[in-house]
Amino acid sequence: MAPFKTLAEFREVLAAAPACNHSAREQAEARNDRLTKPPRALGRLEELGVWLAGWQGTPTPRVRNPQVAVFAGNHGVNARGVSAFPSEVTAQMVANFQAGGAAINQIARSVGARMTVHPIDLDRPTADFTQGPAMSEEDCVAALLVGWNALEEGTDLLVAGEMGIGNTTATAAICAALFGGNGRDWVGRGSGIDDSGLIRKAEAVDAGLAANPSARQDALEALRCLGGREIAGMAGAIARARVESVPVILDGFICTSAAAVLHRAIPGALDHAQAGHQSAEMAHRNMLLKLELDPILTLGMRLGEGSGGTLAVAVARAAADCLSGMATFEEAGVSG
């Protein structure tokens, strides 16, 4: 049976998700203090190692089975000229993912992560949100469940990625609904639109907010009314990871908007997540500041697909290996 059938039930499931294992975290902190290095010499790696310990439930965490789940969806708002590419590119890129030819395939392979691809009703774009809700509640719940069911057994670290022509416009609209402001505050170049396209994006966001007043009042309504199926899919996967105590590394602008929906729906729902990188989309930096997330990497990337988050898996694995594999002063016979 589905764990939820309505958005209200999804909220309840998310609210009941467990916290991290505080005992494992405390043991990891104590172990970290005894490792053969000066205090804080490994900087952010030490924080990441302890964070992994708390969510994996062991003072000696490892990243041996990371999963990259990429979701794809199409957007009705793209008909308003908000992207440099037509919607057909979404399905074409899904085929590229499945054939192993995209950047994310190479990055996932390089960090030892397995990749799963989840296209969601590509032949049925969401409705144009400038005219009303992008999705019915039934469609939004169905997309959440695709993400919920995408988490594979044995995954010890999850990255969620996406593909969806027009989804930076949907993300900008979600951000405006969740954090305030208007279209100009949140839109960016996305796939490379020109100045007139940027104006169209901002106008579409403002029209979407006007057409969907409930989006500013409730985070899950913002997802339903302004988001896309791939954004809901990522939200479902991140939520399932929280319920299963699987740590998550977030990707860029679009993935973070899915996470922000969960954060606004249930405070603390992102305690199991780290920001993998800061996208070149300037609004992503603003969103990370709102969520108080410090990106692991800043490489000027704006590809999506889970690419930046997946690169950060290598850093997380190194953090876990240092915490779990280094000798303590006592074990090495070194004076502390």
Image (cartoon, rainbow, N blue to C red):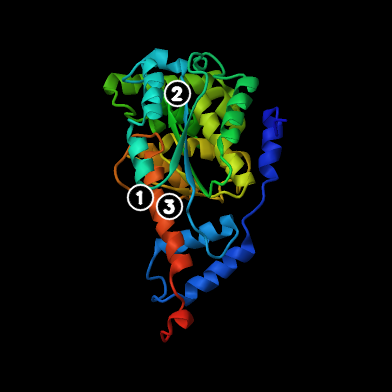
Residue 323, horizontal then vertical, whole percent: 46, 66
Quadrant position of the N terminus in the picture? top right
| Disc 1 to disc 3, C-alpha distance | 9 Å
In the rendered image, the residue lying farthest to the bottom is: 335
Question: Which residue bears the numbered disc 1?
Answer: 297
Three-letter amino acid code at the position of disc 1 = Leu
Where 242 sits versus 22, above or below? above
Q: Nearer the viewer, mark 1 or mark 2?
A: 1
Crowding at dot 2, Cα within 10 Å, few <14 / some 14-19 / many 20+, comes out as many
In the rendered image, the residue lying farthest to the left is: 194
| Disc 3 to disc 2, C-alpha distance | 27 Å
Where 292 sits versus 230, above or below? below
Q: Residue at x 30, y 46 (%)?
A: 299
Question: Which residue bears the numbered disc 2?
Answer: 205
Three-letter amino acid code at the position of disc 2 = Val
Crowding at dot 3, Cα within 10 Å, few <14 / some 14-19 / many 20+, comes out as some
Q: Residue at x 47, y 23 (%)?
A: 73
Element under label 2? helix
The reply to whether the C-beta atoms of the residues labelled 1 and 2 are less than 8 Å apart is no
Residue 239, horizontal then vertical, whole percent: 59, 40
Which mark identifies residue 132?
none
Q: Earlier in the sequence, mark 3 or mark 2?
A: 2
Q: Earlier in the sequence, mark 1 or mark 2?
A: 2
Which mark identifies residue 294?
3
Residue 240, horizontal then vertical, whole percent: 61, 40
Three-letter amino acid code at the position of disc 3 = Asp
Quadrant position of residue 195: top left
Q: Residue at x 64, y 53 (%)?
A: 19
